[in-house]
């Protein structure tokens, strides 16, 4: 009845990793051609860094943490 139970259980982490990797690759694949031009690369990096800074400062303010 439980033949191969643990074998099946150990397959789930591999499935989860492949699922997450597939989602990320399909999400960011349209951006790869934009990275070939220096101007768009700089703009995308600026938006990414700005977004991270915005989220960081917002969470710090919401949680009442001290400023940098």
Image: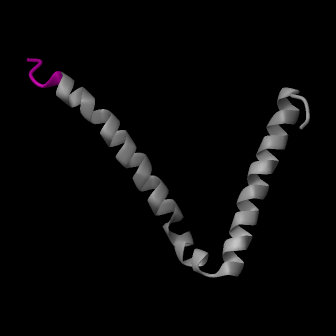
Give percent across and percent down for residue 2.
Answer: 12, 18
Q: Quadrant of the N terminus?
A: top left
Specify the principal SS of the magenta part. Answer: loop
Outermost top residue? 1
> Residue at point 69% right, 68% down?
44
Give the quadrant of residue 33.
Answer: bottom right
Q: Is residue 26 above or below residue 14?
A: below
Give the quadrant of residue 64.
Answer: top right
Q: Which residues are magenta?
A: 1-5
On whether residue 11 falls in the magenta region, the answer is no
> Residue at point 73% right, 71% down?
43
> Residue at point 53% right, 72% down?
32
**Numbered-mark total:** 0
Answer left or right for 19 relative to 3: right
On whether residue 3 falls in the magenta region, the answer is yes
Give percent across and percent down for residue 51.
Answer: 75, 54
Q: Is residue 11 above or below residue 43?
A: above
């Amino acid at each position: 009845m439980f033949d191969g139970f643990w074998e099946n259980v150990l397959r789930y982490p591999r499935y989860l990793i492949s699922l997450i990797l597939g989602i990320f690759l399909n999400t960011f694949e349209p951006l790869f051609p934009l990275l070939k031009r220096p101007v768009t690369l700089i703009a995308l990096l600026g938006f990414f860094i700005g977004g991270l800074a915005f989220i960081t400062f917002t969470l710090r303010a919401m949680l009442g943490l001290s400023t940098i």
